[in-house]
């Protein structure tokens, strides 16, 4: 699956310890996206990825 390709409309950026080379075996990969409508974006994420193990959506206001 090409996650970044699916997210391209939302300008995805890889963040966390993996891209900067200080990751540990238990490190995860974070993706920051930009959206104007959080409800639409959340719906899109649910449709595309909710079937994946460990799927979570975090949002701040």
Image (tube, rainbow, N blue to C red):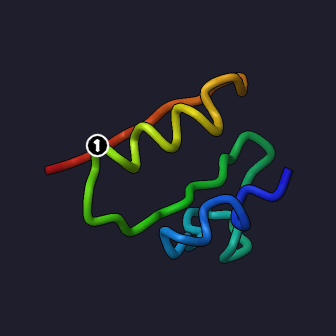
Q: Which residue is mark 1?
A: 39
Identify the image quadrant of residue 36: bottom left
Label 1 crowd bin: few (<14), some (14–19), many (20+), radius 10 Å: few
Image location (x, y in percent) of residue 15: 56, 67
Question: Is residue 3 positioned above or below 13 on the image?
Answer: above
Identify the image quadrant of residue 12: bottom right
Residue located farthest toward the left when viewing the structure as drawn: 61
Question: Is residue 52 positioned above or below 17 on the image?
Answer: above
Residue beneath the point at 73% across and 40% down = 26
Residue located farthest toward the right when viewing the structure as drawn: 1
Residue beneath the point at 47% across and 63% down = 32
Identify the image quadrant of residue 18: bottom right
Image location (x, y in percent) of residue 19: 69, 73
Q: Tag 1, which secondary structure?
A: helix
Question: Is residue 20 positioned above or below 17 on the image?
Answer: below
25 left or right of 32 in image: right
Closer to the camera, 31 or 41? 41
Image location (x, y in percent) of residue 52: 71, 27
Image label count = 1
Image location (x, y in percent) of residue 53: 71, 22
Residue beneath the point at 68% across and 59% down = 6
Residue beneath the point at 73% across and 73% down = 21
53 left or right of 31 in image: right
Closer to the camera, 35 or 54? 35
């Amino acid at each position: 699956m090409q996650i970044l390709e699916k997210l391209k409309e939302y300008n995805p950026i890889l963040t966390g310890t993996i891209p900067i080379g200080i990751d540990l075996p238990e490190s995860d990969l974070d993706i920051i996206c930009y959206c104007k409508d959080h409800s639409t974006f959340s719906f899109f994420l649910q449709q595309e990825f909710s079937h994946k193990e460990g799927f979570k959506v975090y949002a701040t206001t």
